[in-house]
Image: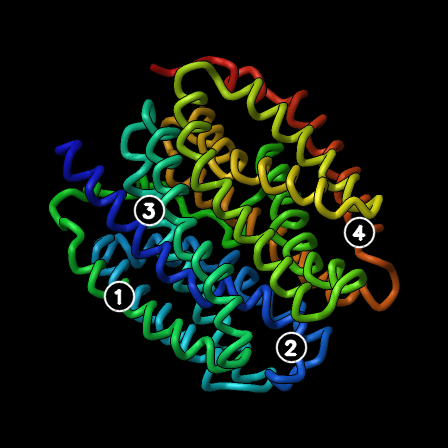
Amino acid sequence: MIDRLVMRNVWVSSWVLSLSLFGDALIYVILPVHADAFGVSMVMVGFLLAVNRIIRTFAYGLIVDLAERIGVKNLCLIAAITATLSTLGYGFLDGAVLLTLSRMLWGLSFAALLLVTLTYAAVNPAKAGTRIGISRSVEQVGPLLAMTVGAWFATIVGPRDVFLYLGLATAVCVGLAFCLDGSAQPERIKKQLSRDRIFPWPDSLDMMIFWMGAGIDGVFTVSISLMWAQYVSLETAILFGGSILAARRLSEMLVAPCSGVIADRFGIRLPLTLMILLAVAGFVLLGAGQLMAGSVALVLARGALGTLFPAAVARINPDNTVKALARNQTWRDVGAAAGPLATGAGLAFVGPEIMHMAVAAAFIIAFAVFVLSPGWKTVTRPVI
């Protein structure tokens, strides 16, 4: 396979995924503080922010099978179209049922686009960290724009109409999908193995990414605007929350490529350990009411872990990388689905500060289990 064409497909597919994320990125900022405008309750907000991940946990295996039949390029094209429709749905539809359908459509779209980018990025295991880093960096551009320009634009046109404009912008990714080179995709994206269970059993690394999903992508993402609303006006809280989540995307855009190169050349153990400890510190700071310091710590940690976890998976599973990456992403999505659900339901009983403290404790336990696993030795060895 020609490396130049593979890298071109990594770039193009990453841009398709990036632009498709416009609506999903902004809904996390808008929906928790404008639930009434969408005709849903606060408990339903948690469900709507989680249902896309719930559907993904059961969809990865089926999507891999679909890619086998129609090809990676065609899968990317279909997912780009459905991603556009789901974003438009946030503006046109209201009520729990219709918004649930729109979020489920997005969940399937994202799962397909993520597997497309990972398929190209993991073609060469020795350079998986570098390619994943590039892909993760490009992926953050769309959400960054949505959480900054989109959040500001929502204050002008309203929390519903902003998604109509984002839907039109998302349609650009459909044209990009046509630019993928169909000749530069793997002949097979999975090995012929006996069919796994729909819900794959996690290893210790999968459980760590589960808590990253539950904590950073779940509890923190859903509650940060509400936490700021305790100290500033609602409009300012939306802008603060959007800016912090946008900074998370910017951090990943800048840190991800560096993390991938470091992991490929020097081993993953040290950077992975440091970033997990930084994430734990961030949760503790947020639990103590130090919103800015805690947010900065989580933003930086998430920027690196988004690359280090997949790179570690590729290092530990060189013979079946895509399957292992799909399983790892499944458990990230399980965590990221459980996080919003627990946050939406739990806010009626406990404050978000207590939730962040609980995640910090769980993260420490999960990391200790990984240190005792065989994978801990594997991630130490650099691959040049």
Say which residue label 2 marks: 34
Say which residue label 4 marks: 355
Label disc, if present, on residue 172 of the rendered structure: 1
- Marks 3 and 2: CB-CB under 8 Å? no
**Dot 4 or dot 2, earlier in sequence:** 2
Which residue does the image show at 54% across and 35% down from the upper left? Answer: 305
Percent coordinates x, y for residue 51 in the rendering: 57, 67
Percent coordinates x, y for residue 199 in the rendering: 54, 52
Q: Say which element carries label 4.
A: helix
C-alpha span from label 3 to label 2: 33 Å
Q: Amino acid at mark 4?
A: Met
Which residue does the image show at 33% across and 55% down from the upper left? Answer: 65
- Discs 3/1, front: 1
Query: Which one is nearer the viewer's eye here, 286 or 177?
Result: 286
CA neighbours of label 4 inside 10 A, class few (<14), some (14 to 19), many (20+): many
Q: Amino acid at mark 2?
A: His
**Dot 3 or dot 2, earlier in sequence:** 2
C-alpha span from label 4 to label 3: 33 Å
- Marks 4 and 3: CB-CB under 8 Å? no
The correct choice, above or below, for 189 with respect to 348 in the image is: above
